[in-house]
Image: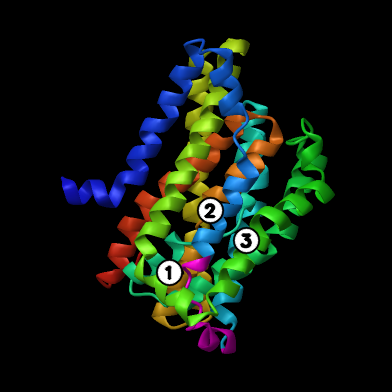
Amino acid sequence: MTAALKRHWFLLGLLTVIPAAIVIAQASPPASVVHAIEAAPTPACTAIILFLMSVTLNTGRLLDSVRHPGPWLLACGVNQIVIPLLCLPLLTLQKSADMQVGLLIAACVPCTMAAASVWTRRANGNDAVSLLVTLITNGLCFVVTPLWMMVGSRWFGTSQTSPELNFGSLMLKMALTALAPALFGQLLRRSAVVAAFVDRYKPWFSNLAQAIILALVFVSSFRGGLRFQQDGMAGDLRHTEFAIVWMCCIGLHLAGMLIAWMLSGALKFASADRRACAIAGSQKTLPIGILISQATGQPFSLLPMLMYHASQLFIDTWIADRMKSGDDPS
């Protein structure tokens, strides 16, 4: 039991934090409490998270993967082009603006920084490929993600509620809170002293990043609870909305993984590279999803990102173990 808690404390935290925040919000807390939670510095917290994740990434093994670009180019293409394209027709199935914009956010954010390499390594895949996919997609997210949000806004009406979601503003926000901290973390790793210290205490850095993520999830859920109470949303309708968007999140993740796996097989990539393509090509990062969700002014738009992230952790654990055992995951 203790070992299971250590491995899955973040998932248990999500399951606890979200309902707790909604209950507290609906209990009519004092105005001072509401103000304090609403004033949480989300961009600064996101920057700290991405710095902590970046500084723990060991990029020393990337040169071989750079020389053989096929696997990481394929995985980046699936992650940043194929999955968002697959998402667009699914937007019409969503029953509310929150779920619509939230699903698009989940589809267009970059590859997760820590989990992709962890699960690739668990599957006996080439974790240098997953590291490269992580660095490239996160490095380009300040351009790619705003472009997809602009597509959603213009042709699907997903993000018309907030002026912060126009291309220029979102690009600047992501450059300052996502790109700059990630680059700074990698620059610090060039110091042998810093790299040795970070590698020694890597679990502490990772746990701190995840704890801050939980704090941001609490803030978003609290805001959602306030809106839920004010708008008097119908419970049955909400359940239907949640079920539809969760199935879409799982479908997008599995579709991205299967497409990456099949294309990498058709291109005759090595087995270790195929496993990295499937995992890194389909995983999405939570911190940047939280950042964009906060900018929409739609508190429940965070839920699809949480659904995608939680689902990929459970699904990819099972698939990675199958890959490791030598079974064909397709």
Give the residue pinned by disc 1: 198
For mark 2, what is the residue?
Answer: 49
Out of 117 and 204, give the one closest to the viewer. Answer: 204
61 is within the stretch colored magenta:
yes
Q: Nearer the viewer, mark 2 or mark 1?
A: 1
Asked if one can make out residue 202 in the rendered structure from this viewpoint, the answer is: yes
Name the residue at 40% across, 37% down: 14
The type of residue carrying mark 2 is: Ile
For marks 3 and 2 on the same chain, the one whose residue lies earlier in the sequence: 2
Above or below — where is 230 with respect to 36? above
Q: Position of residue 179 (x, y in %)?
A: 67, 61
- Which residue is drawn at the image coordinates 39% and 53% (left, top)? 207
Q: Is residue 282 visible?
A: no
Magenta-colored span? 55-67
Disc 2 is placed on an element classified as: helix
Occupied quadrant, residue 227: top right
> Mark 3 — residue?
181
